[in-house]
Amino acid sequence: MRFARKSLQFRVVVSTMILTTVAVFGVGSWMSEQVADGLFQTRLASASKQADTMARSLQSVANPSGSNQDDVTQALQATMQNQVTTATLPLRAVALRPVPGNATAVGNFSAVSPNQPAFSVGQLTPEFLKAVATSGGTQRYQSIALTTYDGSSRPGLVIGTLITIPGAGQYQFYVVSDLSNEQGTLSLVERSMLVAALILVVLVGAVAWVVARIVVRPVRAAADVSQELAAGDLGQRLRVRGTDDLAVLAASFNHMATNLQDQITRLENLSALQQRFVSDVSHELRTPLTTIRVAADMIYESRDELDPMSQRSAELLHSQVQRFELLLADLLEISRFDSGAADLDAEAVDMLAVVGRVIENNQVLAERSGYELKLHAAATPYMADVDARRIERIVRNLIVNALEHGENKPIDIYVAADADAVAVSVRDHGVGMDRQQVRRVFDRFWRADPARPRTLGGSGLGLAIALEDAHLHSGWLQAWGRPGQGACFRLTIPRRSGHDLTSSPLPLPPADAADPDDSVDLSGTGMMNEDDAAPPAGPWTQTGSMPRIAAPEEGGDRNEK
């Protein structure tokens, strides 16, 4: 079955042979019926003439005046026996049966062909006997099965009519013909048609195989070349032979591949230039930014000596230089991910200790903003092979993001583990997100609400970098949200580096969601696919997708860090 699903040529040949078989046997059945009907009608016409000739012969039997019944009986019996013996067509028997009420009848007569069982009119159906008795001299016929000495049966034909024999009265005359020759002819025709049909089906299958091969080979070649192109070998091309439709297809395919190669090359060059530009600019800005930072710090430290307007300017300069440094650091990190230079320095780390450290470092910020950070975890180690610096950055981004949108409600942080994975969830109960926002929450520089004021600053690359860090650990970073119910971000990391995840120890949507069984929307791919046995995601849940390079938008609130 797998071969049949994969081979177009096999399916074409099998389908062609099946359809040909149905068509041939349909036509063969019709032809067999026509031949059988033709043979029967021909034999019926011949037997009808023969029966009419025999009937006239019996009606002309001499019956001299004064002859007794024995003489009539002997004459009729001799005539009938002679008819059976000298008949031009194969006969089984002839028989005479007096019409009921015939007072002059001399009895029943029958004559059977040599070496054949006796025949009796009683073998015929009552309906046929009645039809002959009321025929008024018109012939009637019926198909019957004739038995032989060995117990087998042969097809037969009975023709019956009314005749009047001088001196003996009115009789029912029956002529029984043997149709063995016609049956043999029909069997020969059917066998010949069957053999011809089988040969035709095989030939058609062979022709279909050749034709399908002619058509499928270029398709297979195109598929092979497409796989090579998808694997990165952009120089592969199809061989163009002739000027038919397949050749035109191959030429069009090659033209398309050439255009794609040119575009991909241009995009690769442009991407390399962009990455190098970001990296170079980021590095080049570090020196002047350091100088500006020193000057801004000096002005900020001396702000008490300045007038109120200058003091405010010094504070703004100090905060914006800090944000500029953060943006520059994030740009450098993104450039490392884009260039493939980011590496993972994994070691066995207690994830609970990492999360606790991040909570402790952000406790002052949370208290100043009016938030309460609640950690929910058992007092046991949650060991995993991770890069502690990157995990801290992920958790810090998630917590700061929750502080930005939590509407001053408590923020719950969950840590759980099973035999294969460790998970961290950051749950806020603030404004939440709708379906479209969940789908784009990991995009670079994307902002859910440009009108919302920025309170904690940020570069707009925090969640994008967090997603890249999760991917570097072969982990998942997923988001869930509902307007008015808050949001939840879940990080799942395999305990052993390089292992694939199949499930997460923490649920998503969170257990306190109002309608966790609502419809699911998985947007993005991240490290998951449709075959992963992950727990069912709740309404508007996203598996973090690989971030797209997007132009920064003005304003924003869901991607600040």
Image: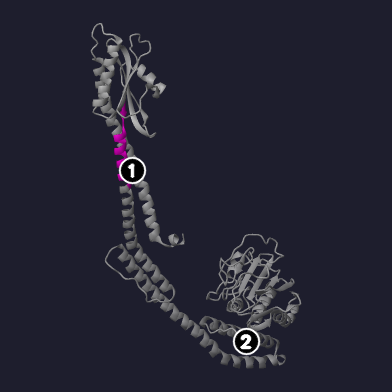
- Residue 207: which quarter of the image? bottom left
The dominant secondary structure in magenta is helix
Q: Is residue 104 above or below residue 294?
A: above
Badge 2 element: helix
Q: Is residue 303 above or below residue 98?
A: below
How far apart in space, not on screen, are marks 2 and 1 (Cα)?
A: 92 Å
* Farthest top residue in view: 66
Residue 267: x percent and y percent?
44, 77
Give the magenta-colored segment's residue range: 174-194
**Magenta stretch: includes residue 191:** yes
Looking at the image, residue 183 sits to the left or right of residue 489; the answer is left
Evaluate if marks 2 and 1 touch, with contact meaning CB atoms under 8 Å apart.
no
- The residue drawn where x is 57% and y is 92% is 287
Residue denoted by label 2:
321
- Give the mark toward the camera: 2 or 1: 1
Residue 261: x percent and y percent?
39, 75
Local crowd size for mark 2, using a 10 Å CA cut-off: few (<14), some (14–19), many (≥20): some
Residue 428: x percent and y percent?
70, 70
| Rendered image: mark on residue 28 | 1
- Going by the numbered disc 2, the residue's amino acid type is Val
Asked if one can make out residue 109 in the rendered structure from this viewpoint, the answer is yes
Local crowd size for mark 1, using a 10 Å CA cut-off: few (<14), some (14–19), many (≥20): some
Task: Out of 81 and 419, give the one closest to the viewer.
Answer: 81
